[in-house]
Amino acid sequence: MRAMNKLKRPVDLTARLATLAFVLILTICADAPVIAEPLQAATADRVGFPRDYRASLKLLSVSVKDDEPSVMTAYGNEQATSITASSQLPYPYGTVIAMEFAHGVRDGEKQIVHDASGTARKGDVARIDVMRRERGYGEVYGDNRAGEWEFASYRPDGTTLVSPEKGGTCAACHRKAGPERDFVYRLRVPAK
């Protein structure tokens, strides 16, 4: 029995010393000056998937095209909806615009079915493309930079389809919209 106690003692002492060292390090770090966090790596998702976007963002527009996915629905946050005329551009920092691409519900003649209000009926959502404008955003795209926007694409469950650091193709396309439009193809105001 006495031999077991002697064996336990070094283990207990080692554990106590480790705990004491950890507490000492935390105490020293707590008193250290706060250092600014380094710039986020290009692999960080600074765009972010807006969960519950249909409820948390305002409906901006719905458009239909012939090829699939055929029903495109644009949503925007408060900053996005604050712009109602091109003379108010650029969009304010913090603007989020989400484009939902869904397959249209089609009838027997392969025409998209509309509800009583004339809105195209949507089937499965293929993807949600999101663009976010913040100070200094877009640098990761180099020559393809489209203002201070970063772009990403997500699956309906929120998993990443195209990460922001690979959004250079999106940025290159949005460059074509030009700085006079703040690199957004159409001014989108809240739908009525």
Image: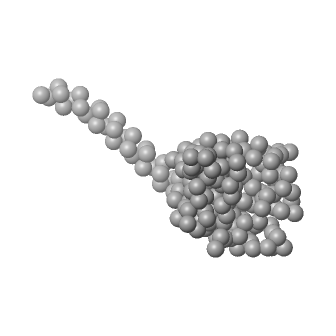
The answer to which quarter of the image holds residue 115 is bottom right
Question: Which quadrant does the C terminus fall into?
Answer: bottom right
x then y, percent, for residue 157: 51, 47
Nearer-the-camera pick, 176 or 43? 176
Residue at 61% x, 41% y is 161
Residue at 34% x, 35% y is 14
Q: In the displayed image of the protein, which residue is found farthest to the front?
A: 109
Asked if 103 appears above or below 55 in the picture, the reply is: above
Residue 42 in sight from this viewpoint: no
Count of picture labels: 0
Nearer-the-camera pick, 57 or 45? 57
User: What colour scheme has been applied to the protein in the rendered image?
Assistant: one colour
Residue 129 in sight from this viewpoint: yes
x then y, percent, for residue 75: 63, 62
Residue at 29% x, 33% y is 11
Nearer-the-camera pick, 67 or 88? 67
Q: In the displayed image of the protein, which residue is found farthest to the top?
A: 3
x then y, percent, for residue 60: 66, 66
Judge from the rendering whether residue 178 lies leftward or rightward of residue 37; answer left or right: right
Question: Which quadrant does the N terminus fall into?
Answer: top left
The answer to which quarter of the image holds residue 50 is bottom right
x then y, percent, for residue 180: 87, 63
Nearer-the-camera pick, 66 or 174? 66
Residue at 61% x, 46% y is 110
